[in-house]
Image (tube, rainbow, N blue to C red):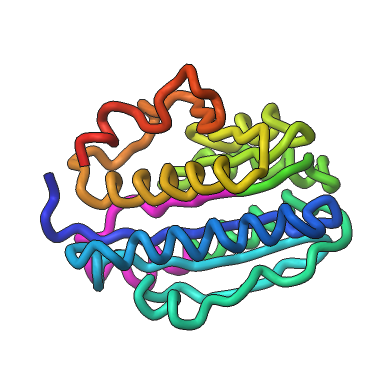
């Protein structure tokens, strides 16, 4: 188990029109819960940096990459949900940011592990041509990408095409979001302490399915 590793975590969150109302409020609460969970473990302080980007037809840098304990103090909401879902443009933009971050920081501090990218969406890409063009580019990057599909309209096929693994919530109620935030927090902490730098051994997880465990055994050891 690594005792001095560090990680950068990037959240790319769909705030298109279909996320209006309860969906975007639920995801905002989910992000806040994740920040709270990460900050309650004193061992993680100073070791996890997190960046939050949202998108619809435009791309917004809600919070630049910073330590989670600082981000928790500044986080409020994810903004107003409206417009189409330009996932291709958003992913292309976040890849540039991740690449710049890896060049600027990781070459100076070899304790940094592969970045984590969580892509959260409830729909399918509106800019499908650009989305298809960046699939191979994303797969060539040295990052761990986890696609998160929210609700029945989430396009799991497109998420699978760009992700190491996919998490699917068929509901967006309070209990489901609570489990979802615990799962993402556990993945981040597990990746921080794991000797393995890849997340390819995860299976598709559905936190709202009571017949399956919320967390994999390897994560539950934390």
Q: Is residue 194 left or right of residue 200?
A: left
Which residue is depicted at the point 32% across and 67% down? 39
* Residue nearest the observer in this picture, 195 or 107: 195
Q: What residue is rendered at 37% in x and 36% in y?
A: 199
Quadrant the C terminus occupies: top left
Q: How many marks?
A: 0
**Which residue occupies the extreme top position in the image?**
211
Magenta region, residue range: 99-119
Q: Position of residue 193 (x, y in %)?
A: 20, 49
Q: Position of residue 160 (x, y in %)?
A: 61, 30
In reply to whether residue 104 is colored magenta, the answer given is yes
Q: Which corner quadrant of the image does residue 73 belong to?
A: bottom left
Give above or below for 185 relative to 39: above
Q: Is residue 183 above or below residue 92?
A: above
**Residue under the point 64% across and 62% down:** 93
Left or right of 75 on screen, residue 215: left
Foreground of the two, 182 or 104: 182
Picture quarter with the N terminus: top left
Residue 110: tell me if it is visible.
no
- Foreground residue, 87 or 220? 220
In the drawing, does residue 135 fall left or right of residue 46?
right
Q: Percent x, y for residue 85?
A: 81, 52
Say whether residue 171 is visible: yes
Quarter occupied by residue 208:
top right
Q: Is residue 10 part of the magenta span, yes or no?
A: no
At x 48% / y 50%, what residue is drawn?
Answer: 181
Residue 95 at what x, y percent from top left? Answer: 56, 57
Task: Using the image, determine if residue 162 lies above or below residue 119.
Answer: above
């Amino acid at each position: 188990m690594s005792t001095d590793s560090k990680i950068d975590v990037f959240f790319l969150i769909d705030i298109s029109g279909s996320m209006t109302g309860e969906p975007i409020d639920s995801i905002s609460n989910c992000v806040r819960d994740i920040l709270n969970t990460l900050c309650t473990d004193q061992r993680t302080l100073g070791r996890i940096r997190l960046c939050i980007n949202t998108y619809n037809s435009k791309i917004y840098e809600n919070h630049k990459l910073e330590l989670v304990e600082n981000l928790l103090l500044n986080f409020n909401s994810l903004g107003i949900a409206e417009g189409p879902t330009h996932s291709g443009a958003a992913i292309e933009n976040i890849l540039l940011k991740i690449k710049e971050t890896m060049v600027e920081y990781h070459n100076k501090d070899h304790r940094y592990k592969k970045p984590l990218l969580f892509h959260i969406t409830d729909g399918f890409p509106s800019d499908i041509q650009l989305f298809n063009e960046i699939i191979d580019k994303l797969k060539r990057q040295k990052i761990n990408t986890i696609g998160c599909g929210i609700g029945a309209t989430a396009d799991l096929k497109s998420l699978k095409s760009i992700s190491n693994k996919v998490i699917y919530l068929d509901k967006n109620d309070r209990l489901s979001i609570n489990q979802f935030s615990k799962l993402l927090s556990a993945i981040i902490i597990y990746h921080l302490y794991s000797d393995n730098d890849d997340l390819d051994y995860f299976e598709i997880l559905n936190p709202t399915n009571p017949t399956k465990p919320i967390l994999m055994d390897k994560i539950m050891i934390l």
